[in-house]
Structure formats: structure tokens, C-alpha cells
Amino acid sequence: MNPYTEDQSQSIGSLGESKLIEQLKDWLGDAAPAAPFGMGDDCAVLPFPSPGAQQLVTADPIIYGKHFDAQVSPAQAAAKLMRRNLSDIAAMGGRPTHAIICLALDPKVSISWIEPFYKALAEEAKRFQCVIVGGDVSSADHFLGAFLTLYGETSAPHPPLLRHSAQVGSPIFVTGSLGGTRLKKHHSFIPRISEGQWLARSEHCLSCSDLSDGLGKDFANVLPPALGCEIDCSQLPIADDAIETAKSSGKDALYHVFNDGEDFELIFALKPGTAVDSFLTQWRKELQTPVTKIGYATSRTVSKAPRLSFKNAPQSLSANGYEHLR
């Protein structure tokens, strides 16, 4: 849906900042607590994390023309904003608690766009059991951006899952399926909150990250700088949408698996020597999400050697992931 209108009477500019903020609070409803624990004061008053837990905080935006376009509905844009932040909390093995949202809006943004966007944010917050406690609204010419800061906490007494902690021989896994995300997954994925918490409790997991920039880049997130990774391409869980995308792109579906980005699945490394069959049995007993072993962490005898190597890959495979600012 195009977020802009040429009808001034139907724009947020017709409301002005104060009335718009009142409308935002109304649209959020009970997803936004009353002051001082939510909107209404200069700051929201937040509780300390639960006993034995550590606080987590992350921030990610969505920008019109960059992260979504007119083919995406306001509700889908809201889901993407909340869930891309939730995915970071999931990768640390945590749960979300509080969110702050800041808006930069052209005055021509339509009320008919911002209202369903905010109502969907409220539904997302309630679905994933967090509350929206404040934010800010700013005018910006020819621009629409929503910037979310999300707070969470670890599952006490377990520490957060961290990046770059795999060891030589660590089996490496991914959840779900990969690639072809531009068709719909970039705004319709389910953040792996339960899966991250399970991994934090399991004591098998050494390192974890979410896949936001593509497997070809984000594989390195679970490895210390001295290690590499061997991926068996015959084992990769290729999404149906990656196969569909490949038909129109002229590229192999594996290209989309490694480079599309915005899968928002988890990639994680287990302790070397973990009994993989036993681990998978435990996972499948408690979780419905598919999980696939895709390779191992490897040693690098030469510091300038490629960090990513393949088994069963086409010779021409390019696997660099998505690089911002290029």
C-alpha cells in the first residue's frame, strides 16, 4: 500500500504532532501501558530484569523504499519491524519485554496507512508478549522510517547465546529453510524465540546468530576469526521460494540461499563431539521447527585462506551474502 496521500485532509499533516501521538496511543491500546510505565512522561519507568536474568537490547528500522514498498501492506510492514528485532532477541536465547518506536514521517503519510500499521504493531506486541512503552515522532521530507528499540532478557539462570564461539569440529545447524525471501518471507517469517530459548537451556550450543544478511555472510557470525566452515550444499534446506526465484533470476537456487538475506532463521554451532542424533531427537521432541545440520567448523592453517568451503557445490557458486552500503 502506498503510504502517501495528496489529499491533505487525509494526511498525518492534518492532525499535527500532538493529535497524532494521541491517536498512536489509542491505536496501540493495551499493548502500551499507562504512564509512568509507558507513554506520557519524558521516560518510561521499566522494571529490572527478572532475578538471575541479564538484560538484552537491540534496534532495527524499516525504511520505505529500502525494507518495504507499496506491495507490502501496513500490517506486513509492522510485522517486519517487530519481528526483525525479535529475531535478534531469539538469537541470544532471550525473550522480549519492552519496545520503543521512533517515527520519521513525511507529513503526506496517510492516516489510512499509519493507523493499520500501529494497530498491527499492537497485535505483534501482544502476540510475542512484550509492551510498547514510548518513542518519538519527527517530521522528515520525502521519507518514511520506523525505528524500533527492543528490550529483552535472558532465560535465567542461563547466560545469553553469543556469536564467534564455535570450536574446531563444531557441527553447524540452521533452522527452517533458506532463500527466496523477497517473494514474501521477508515480512512473514516467525522469529525463532522458542528455539533460541531451548538452545540456551540445552547446554549443547556454543554460538548462535540469526540469518539476516544471507548464509554466505552470516556463517561467519558463529565462528571465531581463526576458524572456517565447510558447508555441504546437498544438505542445505532450500526454500520453495528460492527455487521459484531462481526460475526468473537465471541463477541457481543455491545462489539465493547464500545471498538473498532476510531469512531470519537461526544458525548455531554445537560443542564438538555432540551426539547429533541424540540432539535432533531432543529437538524434535520439544520443537516443531525443522532443523538441519549443514556443516562443521574447521581449522584454517593459512590465515588468508577462504573461511567458507563447500562440498557438493556447483563450481560457479557465488556466496557473499548481502553487504550494506554497497
Image (cartoon, rainbow, N blue to C red):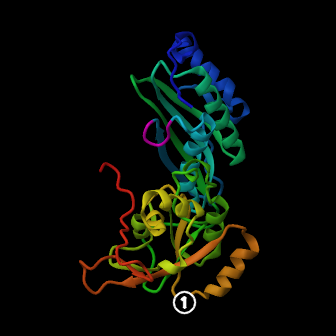
Whether residue 160 is visible here, answered yes or no, is no
Indicate whether 190 appears above or below 221.
above
Q: Residues within 10 Å of mark 1 (few under 14, many from 20)?
A: few
Name which residue lies at 62% across and 19% down.
22
Q: Is residue 315 above or below residue 198?
A: below
Residue nearer the viewer, 225 or 141: 141
Q: Position of residue 268 (x, y in %)?
A: 53, 71
Q: Position of residue 164 (x, y in %)?
A: 42, 70
Residue visible at 42% across and 79% down in the picture:
313
Name the quadrant of the N terminus. top right
Q: Is residue 59 above or below residue 235?
A: above
What type is the residue that disc 1 sits on? Gly
Q: Residue at x 53, y 55 (%)?
A: 181
Residue with the mark numbered 1: 273
Determine if the magenta segment contains residue 76. no
Decide which of 252, 270 is in the foreground and name it.
252
- Residue 263 seen in this snapshot: yes
Q: Give the main secondary structure of the magenta stretch.
A: loop
Residue 109 percent coordinates (x, y): 51, 22
Corner quadrant of residue 281 = bottom right
Horizontal side of residue 11 vs 122, given as left or right: left
- Looking at the image, residue 317 sits to the left or right of residue 98; the answer is left
Q: Residue furthest right?
A: 285
Q: Dot 1: what SS? A: loop
Q: Residue at x 61, y 53 (%)?
A: 189
Q: Is residue 235 above or below residue 44?
A: below
**Could you say which is closer to the camera, residue 142 or residue 192?**
142
The part of the chain drawn in magenta is 65-69
Question: Picture coordinates of residue 171 (x, y %)?
Answer: 52, 82
Q: Nearer the viewer, residue 148 or 44?
A: 148
Q: Is residue 51 left or right of residue 308?
A: right
Counting every numbered tag in the picture gives: 1
